Image (tube, rainbow, N blue to C red):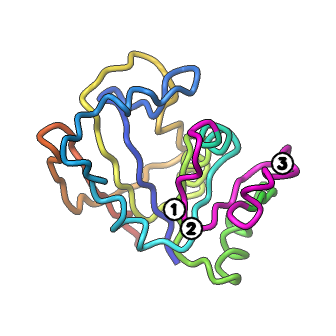
Amino acid sequence: MANYVYIATSLDGFIATADGGVDWLDEIPNPEQSDFGYAEFIGRVDAIVMGRNSFEKVLTFGSWPYEKLVFVLSNSLKHVPENLVDKVEIIGGDNLKTLVNHLDERGYHNLYIDGGRTIQSFLAEDMIDELIITRVPILLGDGISLFGRLTEKLPFRHQKTEILNNTLVKSSYIRLRE
C-alpha cells in the first residue's frame, strides 16, 4: 500500500494561481507531445484520490482525463455528473487513515493523491510515500501552495531528477521511514 503525489509546481512552489487557474501549464513547450512520464506513473496506481476543488477544476477541462477510478473527498458533494457515475465516487469522512484502509480493503492499494488541500492533509498525517514534483520555469508570485504547515519534519530521500524537454525539472523523493 502506497500513496503517491505527481504534480507540477511553479518555481515559487504554487500548483495553481490564487483563483485556482492552471492555464500556465498549457504554456509549457512540448513539440514532441510527450506525457513527461505520466503514463508510466499512472500505470503504478490503482485509483486517484482528489479533493472537491480539484474535481471541480477537472470538470472544466471538457473531457474526463482519467481512466482510473477517482475518489473525490467531499462532505458537501452528494452526486457526480451522470456521465461520470462509473468513473467517480464521492467519499466523505475526516479520518484519512480509515479512508485509505477502506480503499485498500476494496483492492485500491496504490493511490495517486491530487489537489492542494488533499496533498497537504495527507502530508500532515504522514501518509505520502513518494513525491514526484515537476518544476515549471515560471514565477506565479501568488497562488495555491503545494505545501502547508506541518507539526513535525518529514524526511524524504531524493531518488532521481530528470530534465524534460530542456525546460522542466522532475524530481522524485521517497519518504524515509524508521
Judged by its main secondary structure, the magenta piece is: loop
- Which tag is nearer the camera, tag 3 or tag 2? 2
Left or right position of 97 against 128? right
Residue assigned mark 1: 112
Q: Which mark is residue 72?
A: none
Apparent side of residue 90 relative to residue 20 in the rendered image (left or right): right
Q: For residue 68, which numbered disc appears in the image?
A: 2
Mark 2 vs mark 1: give the one in front: 2
Question: In terms of sequence position, does the residue under pointer 2 or pointer 1 come before the other?
Answer: 2
Q: Nearer the viewer, residue 70 or 171?
A: 70
- Quadrant of residue 156 within the rendered picture: bottom left
Looking at the rendered structure, the number of numbered marks drawn on it comes to 3
Disc 2 vs disc 1: Cβ atoms closer than 8 Å? yes
What residue lies at 28% left-to-right and 24% top-to-bottom? 138
Residues in magenta, as a range = 60-88
What residue does disc 3 label? 75
**Residue pictured at 55% horizontal, 40% vertical:** 116
Q: Quick check: 152 left or right of 168?
A: right
Q: Please rate how many residues cluster around mark 3, counting C-alpha atoms within 10 Å: few if below 14, some from 14 to 19, many from 20.
A: few
Distance between the alpha carbons at the discs numbered 3 and 2:
22 Å
Nearer the observer, 95 or 69:
69
Query: What's the amino acid at mark 3?
Result: Asn
